[in-house]
Image: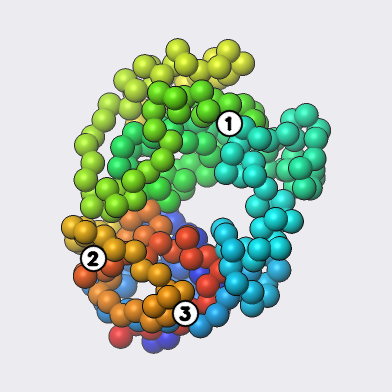
């Protein structure tokens, strides 16, 4: 069976284990059902997630012109402390920025390769943790806008990591941590404007990923260079497909690529 479509971030369900779905224009593929099957992926073109044109993808699924013009790719996406909608100040499109920035946000701790701090919209919990391949996570603060979450993350990342080691995460080379203890330890570094939003009494969330075999030496597949790859799917973690030969493919990092996916 052959499926053809534009790669976008896999949709997920928070179940035991996590359920993954690859969504194309005409197909909805339950990826868990393809574990232990041989897949062929072939890169056939590009489709910008904004303008829809067959143009080389620059970053985050967008062509270069859309990446630098569209509000969905503003700098505040990756650096929430740059958010300005709460000041009624426009970056690229104030209406869009108010819609996204002026809603409840969570600052959290997640443990994937190590304990890290991060920011997400409240509506994206626990999806954000799933996408990062975290096996445990906990909320630290819940604030009313993205800016307050951003300045909290900036303050805390002087005392805890803010990046994930993707190779370590995929090897499942992690140690369980007491995230409630971490949260209490970091409380003193929360900015004064945010201290009233500290969450005192919630528990860790634990996540279980559908992986039959973790790679010992994960090697990243670059479909732009290799064009075609064939391998047996043995697991999914974060937004990575894991294959039997230790090849891993980051679906989210390849958004905007048009592919043929064949189940052999």
> Which label sits on residue 246?
2
Query: Quick one: SS at disc 2?
Result: loop
Q: In terms of depth relative to the viewer, which is nearer, 221 or 198?
A: 221
Considering the image in quadrants, where does the C terminus appear? bottom left
N-terminal of the pair, mark 3 or mark 2, is 3
**In the rendered view of the protein, which quadrant contains the N terminus?**
bottom left
Q: Which quadrant holds residue 151? A: top right
Q: Is residue 130 above or below residue 120?
A: below
- Mark number, residue 54: none
In this picture the colour scheme is rainbow
> How far separated are the C-alphas under marks 3 and 1?
36 Å
Earlier-in-chain disc, 3 versus 1: 3
Which residue sits at x=68%, y=43%?
Answer: 100
| Secondary structure found at label 3 | strand
Relative to 193, say whether 152 is above or below. below
Q: Earlier in the sequence, mark 2 or mark 1?
A: 1
The percent coordinates of residue 92 (x first, y second) are 77, 47
> Which of the numbered marks, if any, corresponds to residue 150?
1
Corner quadrant of residue 239: bottom left
Q: Disc 3 marks which residue?
A: 43
């Amino acid at each position: 069976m052959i499926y053809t479509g534009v790669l976008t971030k896999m949709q997920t369900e928070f179940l035991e284990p996590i359920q993954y779905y690859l969504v194309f224009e005409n197909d909805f593929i339950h990826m868990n059902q393809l574990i232990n099957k041989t897949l062929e992926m072939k890169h056939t073109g590009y489709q910008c997630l904004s303008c829809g044109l067959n143009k080389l993808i620059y970053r985050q699924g967008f062509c270069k012109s859309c990446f630098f013009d569209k509000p969905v790719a503003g700098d505040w996406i990756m650096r929430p402390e740059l958010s300005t909608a709460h000041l009624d100040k426009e970056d690229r499109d104030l209406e869009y920025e108010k819609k996204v920035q002026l809603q409840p946000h969570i600052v959290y701790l997640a443990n994937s390769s190590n304990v890290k701090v991060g920011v997400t919209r409240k509506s994206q919990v626990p999806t954000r943790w799933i996408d990062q391949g975290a096996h445990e996570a906990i909320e630290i603060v819940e604030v009313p806008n993205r800016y307050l979450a951003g300045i909290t993350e900036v303050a805390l990342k002087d005392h805890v990591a803010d990046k994930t080691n993707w190779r370590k995460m995929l090897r499942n080379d992690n140690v369980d941590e007491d995230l409630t203890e971490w949260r209490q330890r970091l409380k003193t570094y929360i900015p004064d404007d945010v201290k009233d939003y500290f969450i005192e009494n919630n528990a860790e969330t634990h996540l279980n990923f559908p992986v039959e075999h973790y790679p010992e030496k994960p090697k990243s597949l670059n479909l732009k260079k290799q064009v075609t790859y064939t391998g047996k799917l043995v697991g999914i973690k974060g937004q990575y497909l894991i294959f039997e030969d230790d090849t891993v493919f980051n679906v989210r990092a390849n958004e905007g690529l048009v592919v043929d996916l064949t189940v052999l």
